[in-house]
Amino acid sequence: MIDEFNAFELCPGCFGETVRRGICSGCGYDREAAQHAIFLETGTLLENKFVIGKPLGKPGGFGVVYLAYDRDLAIKVAIKEYLPQQWASRQAGRATISPLSKEEEPYFRYGLEKFLEEARTLARFRHANVVRINHFFHALGTGYLVMDYYEGVTLDAHVKAGRLPEREAVGLMLRLLDGLAAVHAGGMLHRDIKPQNIYLAHGEQESMPILLDFGEARQAMMEQSGGLTVILTHGFAPPEQYEAKRDQGPWTDIYACGATLYYMVTGKAPPDALSRARKDTLETPQTLARHLSPELDRAIMWALSLGPGCRPDSVAPWRDALAACLIERAKPPEEKLLVDTMAALDDTVTVPVRDEPATLKTVRANPSLYNIHLLYY
Ligand SMILES: Nc1ncnc2c1ncn2[C@@H]1O[C@H](COP(=O)(O)OP(=O)(O)O)[C@@H](O)[C@H]1O
Ligand SMILES: [Mg+2]
């Protein structure tokens, strides 16, 4: 398999043509660097069609995502391998995955069925803001989900480079909500919306936000095994996700979207929902970033309501609340003239400080004729 792959002289890091050994001049990938034993070896050929490249994510609890190359169509794809490390592993030196023991086997099989079911549901969606599923196959004792590959960065990486201006954040969230509304209309929830599961695909003109990594299968597995850690992302998961039996619905994803938008504009994740339920220390977005509009502040706090019944019950009303943030606000009415005196240019006058009218400050006047128009400092 490896020899056949090497014959292509394609780099496993970018599938561009490159030298056979060492570092790729195109993407910097070092094919001789040691690889985590859990990953499939680069160059492995699956279905006589897909060449496995570098891992795209970290080895998670549920599976591994690889960059891969479809030899027939000569395009890059992303492939998710089902590998729940709680129940299964790849034996050293072998590509095949097997359950850890006989006891774990039924859980492993159940999760695999759920992974396939989730793939089937997702494959029905053809939406620009939802990851596109193209194929599913069984191999090496497990299942593989083949997706479109997007060039870009995660929303998390984008925000880590600097929190986003309000308009950009709201614009991205509105497009994600289009995708999410389609998912909900199809009777499915995402259940794990967070900045690491949103991808910003580079477009011709602007980035296209895409929902990745649905958590339905993980939720089902969690209910089966009674473990909570697989699905929850503290800060982004609402309280009802901490109790498997509690009623989940579109409002569950809306909490996670609210938390994601909070993160986009403040650079901070909200405190986790359980600690909020004990003592709510959530600061409003405006407290952390004063320039944000009151409309956005209200919309985010609405989505982050702890009680599911207090949140928007579907995407539509929350989308409307966010859209209101994009409407150009009318200029505030002419401010009341607080200082009305005759002053010449550069005379000093005493004016109240904005937002703290009790504080006065002496500044140089900039009169327009005789009225001082510098009302606040
Ligand atoms: N279709 C894709 N195109 C490009 N990158 C992807 C794609 N799917 C996943 N990734 C990358 O792999 C990472 C992990 O994928 P994800 O589906 O979130 O799995 P997990 O969180 O279980 O590892 C993502 O954060 C993203 O960086
Ligand atoms: Mg993920």
Image (spheres, rainbow, N blue to C red):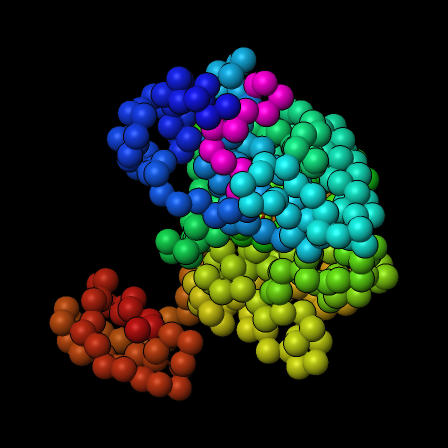
**Residue name at image x 40 percent, y 81 percent:** 357
Would you say 223 lies left or right of 338 here?
Answer: right
Q: Main secondary structure of the magenta part?
A: loop
**Residue name at image x 40 percent, y 22 percent:** 6
State whether residue 297 appears in this view.
Answer: yes
- Give residue 328's position: percent from left, percent from top: 49, 47
Q: Residue 277: within the magenta? A: no
Indicate the quadrant containing the C terminus: top left, top right, bottom left or bottom right. Answer: bottom left
The one of 223 and 193 positioned closer to us in this rendering: 223
Residue 376: quarter of image: bottom left
Would you say 308 lies left or right of 368 here?
Answer: right
**Residue 57, placed above or below residue 286:** above
State whether residue 330 appears in this view.
Answer: no
Per the rendered image, the range of residues in magenta is: 39-49
**Residue 292, placed above or below residue 92:** below
- Give residue 214's position: percent from left, percent from top: 67, 44
